[in-house]
Amino acid sequence: MLQKNAKYLVRNYKKGDEVRLAEIYSECFHPATPRLVKKWLRRAGVLPEQLFVGEVEGKLASAVTVEFKKLHLGEEVYLKVGGIAGVCTDSDYRRKGIVTNLMKQALNYSKQSGVSNSALFTDLDIPAHRIYSRLGFVDIVNSQSFVKFFDYPFIFRRWIRRRNRLLRYAKMARRKLKGWEKSVVMEIKGVCTLSFRFRRGRFQMLKKPPRTPDVIFSTDLPTCAREFSGAMQWEEAVRTGKLVFKKGEPADRDMLKRIFTWEWEEQLCRRE
């Protein structure tokens, strides 16, 4: 499949794309390598015609993948669906309608392949959710995750390391964080106090709280667990009083929200 646009080219996956896909996946999802991308595609049974990419001036900028799955609806009852996965766009090429076009191509491909439904998993409070809604997707299930941590300093250290790995590939995050060198104290009610700072382009865990931190906030144990697992709804936690700021300028609070949710894009414009 090949489709030309005035500003970009839509085509299917070809050998060698995994190098560029690894860079975009690392920015949008989690650290990846070309080898891991090929391994993931192989495990998911993705054929070249099931992976749609958008190319701008010869550079791969966006991607959408179709994965055919069977949903178990009951005893010996299965429904074949065209699952949508790996929806991503390089931060330099967003808000151009590329991923919306790729989604349309993926849905059309699924329909032509004989499936009657398409499904995907997504957070509810991200800009991409509006794209899915405009394309006809509806929310049918809100899942819940349960997790219990025992060694919070250890988990926090892993969280810091993960943020630094993500930072290597997140151009938008590096631009936003440039010049922001602050220290943060997080008080987990009845459990412990954790602190970190951002300095010289890296997140650094502190063994003990600084004397004069720039930001202080407190939260309860369940909310903290959701923070570390990436399932926390920030605005709701603040609104319901489960996350309370004791110190910090509005700009610093906004930056902290971006760090924990890892959302660096401004509000998505209508075109995308």
Image (spheres, grey):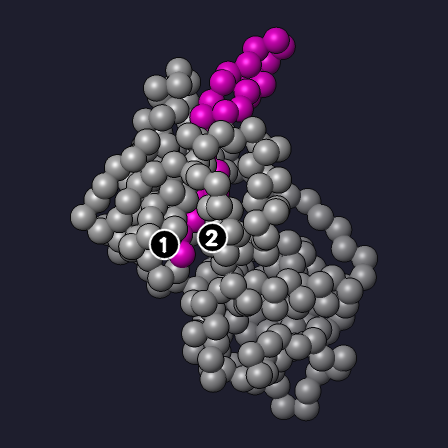
In this picture, residue 199 sits left or right of residue 61: right
Please indicate, yes or no, whether residue 216 appears anywhere in the rendered image: no
Q: How many marks?
A: 2
Residue 21 x %, y %: 48, 49
- Kind of element beneath mark 2: helix
21 relative to 170, above or below: above
Residue 252 x %, y %: 48, 78
**Does the CB distance between marks 2 and 1 fall below 8 Å?**
yes
Q: Is residue 87 magenta?
A: yes
Which residue is drawn at the image coordinates 43% and 67% (left, top)?
172
201 relative to 268, above or below: below
Give the residues drawn in magenta, as a range.
Answer: 68-90
Mark-to-mark CA distance, 2 and 1: 8 Å
Front residue of 94 and 242: 94
Q: Is residue 96 magenta?
A: no
Q: Which residue is mark 2?
A: 20
